[in-house]
């Protein structure tokens, strides 16, 4: 797999301190959260987010943008698109950890079949999809 050269449009900068039990903050301060390990992973849970939630939020937002672009380019009748990302972390057979993603799309104004086609087209455009392709199992589900 070759690495694509890009013409930068924007660079996000965030710093995590103390890993999964610390904090994460963007350089401009708009993102500033405590991190907590979920109970299902042996942590205390509670008031704090985690890398999987942050990844899910970013992927859902980015994919939603790609979906809107594709819908406009195809002159689709889609009125509103809502993407919900399910990001799962689990153990691999080799003893490491990996992620899996399900992207659920609720698209108003189009049939379920057209919604699925739009999701598949957006998956080819979305930067998160391009970054994860071949590395993470991503399922697209039109709800």
Image: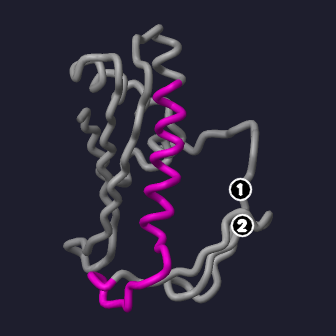
- Looking at the image, which is closer to me, 131 or 72? 72
Circles 2 and 1: CB atoms closer than 8 Å? yes
Write the residue at 54% across / 23% down. 69
- For disc 2, the marked residue is 26
Mark toward the viewer: 2 or 1: 2
Q: Which percent across, then down, holds residue 3?
A: 58, 45
Q: Which badge, 2 or 1, comes first in the chain's sequence?
A: 1
Residue 117 among magenta residues: no
Residue 48 among magenta residues: yes
Q: Which percent across, then down, holds residue 46?
A: 42, 84
- Looking at the image, which is closer to me, 115 or 9? 115
Q: Is the residue marked by circle 2 packed among few (<14), some (14-19), or many (20+) residues within 10 Å?
A: some
Which portion, as a residue range, is magenta?
39-68
Is 26 displayed left or right of 41 in the figure? right
Write the residue at 52% across / 52% down. 58
Write the residue at 33% across / 67% down. 98
């Amino acid at each position: 797999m070759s690495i694509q050269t890009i013409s930068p449009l924007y660079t996000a900068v965030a710093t995590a301190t103390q890993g999964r039990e610390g904090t994460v903050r963007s350089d401009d301060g708009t993102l500033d959260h405590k991190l907590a390990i979920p109970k299902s992973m042996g942590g205390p849970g509670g008031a704090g987010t985690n890398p999987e939630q942050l990844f899910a939020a970013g992927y859902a937002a980015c994919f939603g943008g790609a979906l809107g672009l594709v819908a406009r380019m195809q002159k689709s009748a889609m009125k509103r698109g809502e993407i919900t990302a399910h990001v799962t972390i689990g153990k691999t057979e080799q003893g490491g950890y990996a992620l899996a993603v399900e992207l659920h799309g609720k698209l108003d104004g189009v049939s379920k079949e057209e919604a699925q086609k739009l999701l598949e087209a957006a998956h080819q455009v979305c930067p998160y999809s391009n970054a994860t392709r071949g590395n993470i199992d991503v399922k697209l589900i039109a709800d």
